[in-house]
Image: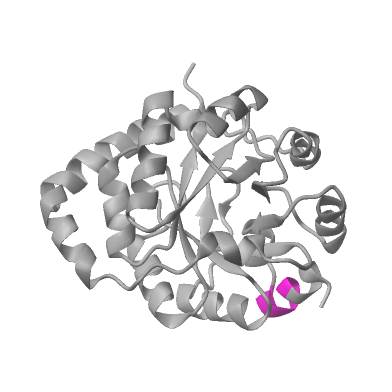
């Protein structure tokens, strides 16, 4: 029985084939010269001080459906920046999250924070698309990639000037993540096979991750208490989308989450 993640990955492979026909890799590489210089996503999260926030621009999800009907991505990103976020994540998957790569391009031009392309990256073509659109970082999901492609895409992202945020759910994948060279590691509290969430998953993983790495807790973070609990456990940053996007006053929600 295929999982939700299996279905998303299968869809993504078809999308990649179409994207390559529309814009070949060689053309993307020539357009990189016109992209804005990369911003330092890693150091924005590694800096000393309280727990950092990667605030996510996210219209919908497979588990929740439409999260925010009043959706203006650039204005949301500006609000994140004005209220204390350290970085911005932009969902670019169209079929399952109602995202668009254009949202990332427009947001990157409107804010000064580093911006992450949040998608199911399976191919070099997507990395090139991300950099052309101005992405400073990309998400790589260990559960979606074999050892060879995880290492390959991690290295290619760095060669393009971007920071790879390497995400895992299964503890058994941590060795693979280390072997790929990852130093920015995200632990997803949501099992992408079932979409069940356990906020303590990141905390259990903290002791397995070297202090030399920056650890990001992802999914299921809904309150200041959640953020404080993760910070006390030694988590460096949190990625929050659904909670912020569902609030009537996004700016106030960011400030509350960060204790400001």
- SS majority, magenta: helix
Residue 222, can we see it? yes
Picture coordinates of residue 81, whole percent (x, y): 59, 78
Q: Quadrant of residue 199?
A: top right
Q: Is residue 197 left or right of residue 192?
A: right
Does 201 lie within the magenta span?
no
Q: Quadrant of residue 106?
A: bottom left
Picture coordinates of residue 134, whole percent (x, y): 35, 67
Does 250 lie within the magenta span?
yes
Q: Is residue 39 left or right of residue 102?
A: right
Q: Quadrant of residue 253?
A: bottom right
Picture coordinates of residue 162, whole percent (x, y): 41, 57
Picture coordinates of residue 203, whole percent (x, y): 80, 40
Q: Is residue 104 left or right of residue 23?
A: right
Residue at 39 percent across and 63 percent down: it is 135
**Residue nearest the viewer, comparing 50 with 82:** 50
Residue at 37 percent across and 58 percent down: it is 161
64 shown above or below 255: above
Residue lying furthest front: 212
Residue at 50 percent across and 68 percent down: it is 114
Highlighted magenta segment, given as a residue range: 248-254
State the colouring used for the structure image. one colour
User: How many discs appear?
Assistant: 0
Residue at 81 percent across and 60 percent down: it is 223
**Residue nearest the viewer, comparing 191 with 33:** 33
Residue lying furthest top: 1
Residue 218, can we see it? no
What quarter of the picture does the C terminus occupy?
bottom right
């Amino acid at each position: 029985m295929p999982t939700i993640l299996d279905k998303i990955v299968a869809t993504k492979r078809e999308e990649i084939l179409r994207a390559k026909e529309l814009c070949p890799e060689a053309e993307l590489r020539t357009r990189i010269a016109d992209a804005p210089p990369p911003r330092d996503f890693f150091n924005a999260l590694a800096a000393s001080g309280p727990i950092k926030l990667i605030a996510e621009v996210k219209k919908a999800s497979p588990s929740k459906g439409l999260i925010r009907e009043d959706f203006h991505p650039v204005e949301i990103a500006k609000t994140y920046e004005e209220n204390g976020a350290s970085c911005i994540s932009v969902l670019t998957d169209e079929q399952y999250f109602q995202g668009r790569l254009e949202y990332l391009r427009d947001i990157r031009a409107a804010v000064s924070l580093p911006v992450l392309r949040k998608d199911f990256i399976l191919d070099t073509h997507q990395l090139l698309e991300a950099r052309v659109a101005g992405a400073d970082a990309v998400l790589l999901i260990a559960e979606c990639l074999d050892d060879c492609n995880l290492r390959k895409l991690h290295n290619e992202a760095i060669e393009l000037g971007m920071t790879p945020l390497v995400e895992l759910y299964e503890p058994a994948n941590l060795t693979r993540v280390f072997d790929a060279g990852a130093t920015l590691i995200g632990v997803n509290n949501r099992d992408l096979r079932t979409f069940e969430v356990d906020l303590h998953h990141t905390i259990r993983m903290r002791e397995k991750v070297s202090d030399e790495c920056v650890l990001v807790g992802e999914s299921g973070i809904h309150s200041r208490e959640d953020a404080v609990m993760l910070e006390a456990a030694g988590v460096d940053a949190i990625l929050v989308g659904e909670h912020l996007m569902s609030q009537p006053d996004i700016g106030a929600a960011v400030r509350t989450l960060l204790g400001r």
